[in-house]
Amino acid sequence: MLQRCEACGAFAYPAREACPACLSAALTFVDAPRRGALLAETTARVPSDVYFRERAPWRIGLVRMDCGPTMVAHLHADCVEGAPVMMSFQLDKSGQAVAFARPERETPNMADDRQWREMTADPKFRRVLVTNGRSLIGKEAVAALKAAGAKTVFVGVSEPWRPFAGEQLLRGQQGIEVVTLDAADEKSAADLAADIGGKVDILVNTTEYVRPGGLLDRRGTSIARDEIDQAYLGFINLAQAFGPTMRMRGADGINSSAAWVNILSVHALANWPAFGAYSASQAACLSLSHCLRAELRPGGVKVMNLFTGPVDTEWFQTVPPPKVAPRAVAQAIVSGLKGGLEEIYVGDVAEEIRQRLAANPKALERELDR
Amino acid sequence: MKNSLRTPYDGIVMAAPVTIPYARYSIESAQWWIGRALSALVAKAGIKASDIDGLCVSSFTMGTDSGIGLTQHFGLCVRWLDTIPLGGASAIAALRKAARAVQARDADIVACVAGDTNHVDSFRLTLENFSRFNQDAVYPYGAGGANASFALIARNYMRTYGVTREDVGRIAVAQRANALRNPHALMKAPLTIEQYLAARPISDPIHLFDCVMPCAGAEAFLVMRDETAASLGLPAARLLSTIERHNAFADDPMQVRGGWAMDIGELYAMAGVKPDDLDVVQTYDDYPVITMMQFEDLGFCNKGEGAAFVRQHDLTIDGDFPHNTSGGQLSAGQAGAAGAYLGLVEGLRQVLGQAGSTQVKDAKLGLAAGFGMINYDRGLASGAAIFAGPAR
């Protein structure tokens, strides 16, 4: 995304209030062509900032974009002076969008680059806790994270003596450790954190508690209370048990903590009355995630929210397609972590709601009512 | 050589060049350093503070003060006032404005002052908050500061024109030799080309001796009409010409020339002299590669010949091309905005015959240049002035 002048078409960078070519104020951020050429590079060996001092030497360069502007950029190690590069904005550890230059073509082990990994939360080589292995999404997430090269995946299972479908996929597998966790239980979360809290680099919160119904066709508050207990208070338990240690371990050498992932219904953003109370519990979790993001930021730990429409699981049985396959959610978790994203939308329903919310929120509210 | 259409600086002079000896770190404020410089100006010129009716100030570390606050702080009552935040181009810009003010009789005696303090963390804070573009699009990239930004420029320039580190090092080594004759220079140890080449890398290709040492200090001079100087019995240098340019050659993908190249014909035409006529040259040396660029852009050689030029000339005080005779910022220290003044003030001492231990024999005609404000990817501001001592 770069600013482009609506009057004369010139691209501008760094961000300005008026076009340097024609002084128009109509500068809009648009997806700009990503190709450029690396004009010159340097390696900062004595940075003035403590963050970079700890990570020096740090390589940066000046890139001339094919579309005009020059950009100071972090460099992938395989970038060569004079050669073409592909630019993207990545979120750095402080949450700031920064320009990153990668070689135009794929190079071996490209995602393992030291400076690139500083911008991402790639599960490769990392230790991950998937909080609920009983759910379909949980099991798919474990498989996808293992396939992406995670060193260890801890899988939380409540009441582990109680058998569940797909259990054999988790038990006795190399690099997968089943641990006892009931996120809704404060003591359970604290006990597990005491055991493995210092080894969790990425936490994937797969807590799932879906019940249909809104306000008037339910009696009393017991189901709503369960929704809050499981999703919202479960989130709080996990955050209080694992968050402080993760925040402290954001720069813990090569085994530092990197990210926290929430899987949220896209109806956290716009209430879906058919699952109205559930939507509200998700909205509460979304709000809390912004608080968590702010509190983890000083440690350089990212919070990624994954928004999905109805998933193809038993609690959405009565909902007609399109529905999201649990495997698609799992793959999106991995790709979001690899990109170092803060938000990712999975599936057509989630994407549609994202777009319609931006275009006309009142119309969306009215139409979700059908 | 083209003709200049600008109004000549007839009868405009500079006097009383003063330097407050630098300190690596200071617990004093910028206002303290500026106060010392004003006091030294008054003492050296033999005037009263109330005789100063114009004031021009530059500083990075005055906090929320600007020139107006300083008038009350120092008990000055002026009828012309300016604050110039142009970094390394501040001295030339101050001189240009002050010269026209006294020429138009808006003021009679203008004090041009720059001073900065250097607390233990001042430099980093200045880096972090330098400009909006810098905060947004430079500092988050490794926080290498000016060293990293100029490293990119240096690398491109050196590759484009086949310049080696040894070529660039000649400038730093010669300036260190000059500094050893300046008792106030912060750098006191000799520097050989071998030591220069063996120095630790800071941000490739910038190595330790390519970098200035941030410090505290102040520099100042007076601008007035020649009859004022005569009535005060003050030795004074005549201002012959100036140039100033900002954001030049914006379409160059990387900086290989400064704004001087745009105005150089004007500079010599207005002064009525040629580059060869100059007895002493003071460039803005935040990095020696920028000095090499100035040798080209100020007309001492063609673009791309800077390396050959420094190989062919002796840049020391007694050499055939006396340059940055105080040791420059590289060896005397960079006292913030006073770094902009260092060359001009030393140049004035030279043509006035007041340079003492760094005096170039028979120096009559001098040039001082300024360069500053790496707002994003290049230095935006440039300027230069030519001036003559009473003997010419």
Image (cartoon, coloured by chain):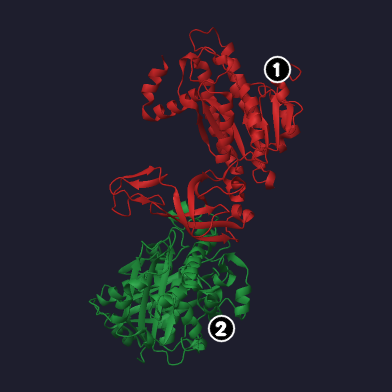
Chain colours: A red, B green
Examine the rendered structure and indicate whether residue B341 appears above or below residue A182: below
In this picture, residue A223 sits left or right of residue A271: right
Q: Which residue occupies 58% across, 59% down?
A: A47
Question: Residue A6 at what x, y percent from top left?
Answer: 30, 45
Q: Residues within 10 Å of mark 2 (few under 14, many from 20)?
A: many
Kind of element beneath mark 1: loop
Q: Quadrant of residue A204?
A: top right
Seen from the viewer's position, the closer of residues B274 and A36 is A36
In this picture, residue B99 sits left or right of residue B199: left
In this picture, residue B167 sits left or right of residue B96: right
Which residue is disc 1 drawn over? A164
Seen from the viewer's position, the closer of residues B113 and B139 is B139
Confirm whether circles 2 and 1 share one chain: no
Q: Residues within 10 Å of mark 1 (few under 14, many from 20)?
A: few
Seen from the viewer's position, the closer of residues B281 and B44 is B281
Examine the rendered structure and indicate whether residue A230 appears above or below residue B93: above
Chain that bears disc 2:
B
Seen from the viewer's position, the closer of residues B318 and A41 is A41
Q: Which label sits in the foreground, 2 or 1?
A: 1
Tag shown at residue B177: 2
Q: Which residue occupies 40% across, 54% down?
A: A69
Question: Residue B252 at what x, y percent from top left?
Answer: 38, 63
Chain that bears disc 1:
A
Identify residue type, mark 1.
Phe
Tag shown at residue A14: none
Q: Quadrant of residue A123?
A: top right
Identify residue type, mark 2.
Ala
The quadrant of the image that shows the C terminus of chain B is bottom left
Count the labels in the image: 2
Q: Looking at the image, do the residues carrying marks 2 and 1 touch, with CB atoms under 8 Å apart?
A: no
